[in-house]
Amino acid sequence: MVAMLASNHYDYLKSIQAQQIELSTLDMATSGINIDEIYIYKNSAADPQFMPLHRIASGFCKVVAEHYPILVGRPLVNDEGKGVINVDPTNLCLPDIADINVEHPAEDYMESSSDGKVMFFNLHKFYKHSGVDELPHATYTKDHSAAIVRIIRFRNSDYAALYISFSHMLFDAIGATAFFNNWAECTRNLDNPSYQLQTPPVNDRKVVSDYFASVEPTEPPHIQHLRDQSAVPIMKAPGSIAPLLLSIPERPLFKEQHLIHFSKEKFEQIRQDVDPEKTTNLALATLLTKVLLQADIQAFNSMPQWSYVMIPYECRQRTKIPPAYSGNLSFTAIAFMDSQMVLNSSYKEVAQAIKEHCSKVSSEYAKNTIDVIENEAGVFFQASLSMCNSADTSYVGLTNLRHMSLYTIDFGYGGPAILSCNYFLREGMMRIYNNQQDGGIDLFLNLKNDMFKHVQSSKELLKYAQVIF
């Protein structure tokens, strides 16, 4: 028996029941931030029905109806003062799913490595020359769609791009990656009426509060440091943190984005040169910390007092929380170092200093993070003020997506050939993606152009990396 696709993909959403999904503190702490991904697919089989909109949209709506109704709800503070996503079947926040047709081949927006073997998508070129000024962003404040999907079709090209945007409050990187793969799996099996998702998500945020209820918090050193850096007394949170967090305005995207590529061999060489006993991720953070500090000194003609390194880590493997949990379960480890020490110390010494701060991750530290957000909102906001590149501070915010299952997002036409992303928040933030073309990594970096010119001329960086744009 073959299932019949709904004539209108929104018909799948008719089965959704009224419900309120409670948001955790960690979910609400990401209010105003989006996950905006761009995946480039290649039509290697020359399929005339490559990535059809109705099928992709049907898979999206079906998996949302059956497993992710949170994507069509709206955030509010309930009568108990808790932040929830309210799913009202009579007033769903419908996804916005559409094609975009571009009158140029995708290759017009591509860059290549120096040997011509690796291709990259240049978002700046795309916005400048495609006729698309900016891809839309999911938002709740203007009652726009909470999820936006675009399939970008290029003229006379084997490539199509999938763009997806939704609120970070719904998922962290692991939860989002699981959603992408579940959406693709559902799409591949639309014609099978008996098919069931292989690994359904765990959406109940209560598993987080239940787990941490019995954990005694331990304060990491960076919390007191942030208190000390505040120019005014730290603001205490109100009785309920939900109204404050959910009222955070949407933050503008940082559009001075750059891409740096490290081949597999050069990436490993960084580790060998920094400290063979450290991880490649820590070695890369060390290289970037020294390079960014030197660029900061050149850009501002002064020595910053502090050098910060922020590395998010997720807590599923460190707790009894189910691996399929879909919500936010990522915490930040922050290394704060005297900039003079960073400048004068060896790579090995700086790597050890970062490790001492950022490797001490535990449930006890995670519980303290939750408590601080709930009870000392000022510390939470002070972190946002301190983490930047300025005359006073140097900053590396490193989000590692290397081990996410992104190349397996297969809607029935193969996985993506190239990974990219839209503009994202905050100066100094970085994202690392695995590049399956050569086994290396792509580093997307938010940095002001006037400062990046010092980065891209760094002999220390160019020893290992190629600047793409």
Image (cartoon, rainbow, N blue to C red):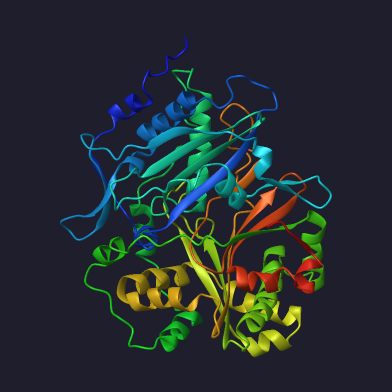
Label total for image: 0
Residue 370 position, x and y percent, is: 38, 68
Lateral position of residue 329 relative to residue 279, left or right: left
Residue 100 position, x and y percent, is: 50, 34
Whether 297 is drawn above or below 108: the answer is below
Does any portion of residue 199 appear in the rendered image? no
Question: Which residue is more in the foreground, 333 or 161?
Answer: 161
Residue 273 position, x and y percent, is: 81, 71
Q: Residue furthest left?
A: 79
Q: Quadrant of residue 188?
A: top right
| Residue under the image location 53 percent in, 47 percent down | 37
Q: Residue furthest top?
A: 1
| Residue under the image location 48 percent in, 27 percent down | 53
Residue 85 position, x and y percent, is: 28, 49
Whether 76 is drawn above or below 379: the answer is above
Lateral position of residue 347 relative to residue 374, left or right: right
Whether 10 is drawn above or below 214: the answer is above
Q: Quadrant of the C terminus?
A: bottom right
| Residue under the image location 38 percent in, 39 percent down | 68
Does any portion of residue 248 appear in the rendered image? yes
